[in-house]
Image (cartoon, helix red, strand yellow):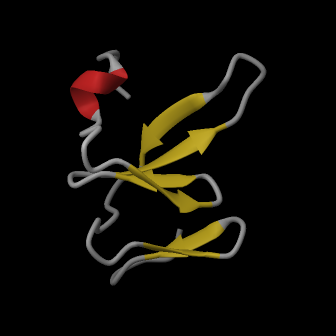
Amino acid sequence: MDGRPLNKVIDTASFSYLGSSFYKDKNHVYTHYVMVDGGNFWIVDNADVKTFQVLGSCYAKDKNRIF
């Protein structure tokens, strides 16, 4: 994300798995890239947390975009 520890970025009380590689908390939508070392979490830029939903195994949408 920006070098900060995950617990300083992610709101763990509202953090949940959405399906595929997507997660969200009350502030952001995240995607997880699996790698040999465990992988990385990234904030999905411009995703609307309230309307974000996963569409199958690798796509998602919100009120404005398809990811």
Image-based side of 15 in relation to 42, left or right = left
Q: Decide: is 42 above or below 8.
A: below
Q: Quadrant of residue 6?
A: top left
Q: Decide: is 62 above or below 34.
A: below
Give how far across and how far down residue 49 sits, in percent.
Answer: 29, 65
Image-based side of 6 in relation to 21, left or right = left
Give how far across and how far down residue 4 sits, in percent.
Answer: 29, 17
Give how far across and how far down residue 5 sits, in percent.
Answer: 32, 16
Q: Residue at x 29, y 68 (%)?
A: 48
Give how far across and how far down residue 7 sits, in percent.
Answer: 29, 24
Say how many tags the image has. 0
Q: Residue at x 69, y 65 (%)?
A: 58
Most foreground residue, 26 or 30: 26
Q: Residue at x 39, y 72 (%)?
A: 52
Q: Residue at x 38, y 29 (%)?
A: 1
Q: Residue furthest right?
A: 36
Q: Residue furthest front?
A: 13
Q: Quadrant of residue 43?
A: top left
